[in-house]
Image (spheres, rainbow, N blue to C red):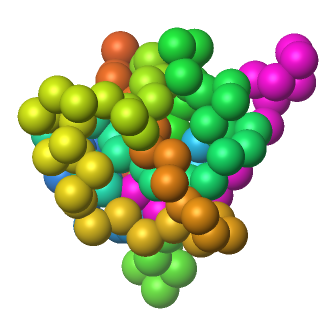
Amino acid sequence: MEHRDAIEELGRDECLALMTTQRLGRLGVVIDGVPLVLPMQFALNGETVVLQTNQGAKSLHAPLTSVSFEVDHVDWEQGVGWSVLIQGLGEDISTAIDEHSEALRSLAVHSWAPPPADRWLTIIPRVITGRRVRAS
């Protein structure tokens, strides 16, 4: 297999479908010019990533800034894996009173953050990309 055949670009719909098979991803934020990547459980509502956390770096630096969220999976037996990257705008919906935000806060997202996990973040995607990699 040639190297270029080992990497397959994924379409937006397939990226979103693959994300629904996982519960753990990585949130990327920039704090004082330094990138920080944190594992987080998530839910997906359409194209919107929904995260629940506590007060801290994520909830202070993700809202109203460009963030990224990556989800992946590897099947070591089959020698295939995939990765999806969402780049978009972080929003804090913790105290939003609109119906849409209230519905997002009702999703089953289980935070690993120490209590109280009372901060709700969303990522509104600008770009969704993905690729499947096969061992050659």
Quarter residue 131 falls in: top left
Percent across and percent down for residue 85 are: 46, 36
Residue 93 is situated, as x and y percent measured from the top left of the image, at: 37, 33
Q: Residue furthest bottom?
A: 77
Can residue 127 be seen here? The reply is no
Q: Is residue 31 magenta?
A: yes
What residue is drawn where x is 15% and y is 46%?
Answer: 103
Tell me if residue 7 is in the magenta stretch. no
Q: In the displayed structure, does residue 99 sit left or right of residue 25?
A: left
| Whole-percent x, y for residue 109 in the image | 36, 64
Q: Quadrant of residue 31?
A: top right
Picture residue at 34% right of the left edge, 23% below the top: 125
Q: Is residue 77 left or right of residue 16?
A: right
Give the extent of the magenta segment: 29-42
Q: Residue at x 27, y 67 (%)?
A: 108
- Answer with left or right where residue 20 lies relative to residue 59: left
Residue at image point 41% right, 39% down? 94
Residue 39 falls left or right of residue 9? right
On the question of residue 34 being in view, the answer is: yes
**Above/below status of 22 relative to 122:** below
The image shows residue 13 at horizontal and vertical percentages of 14, 38
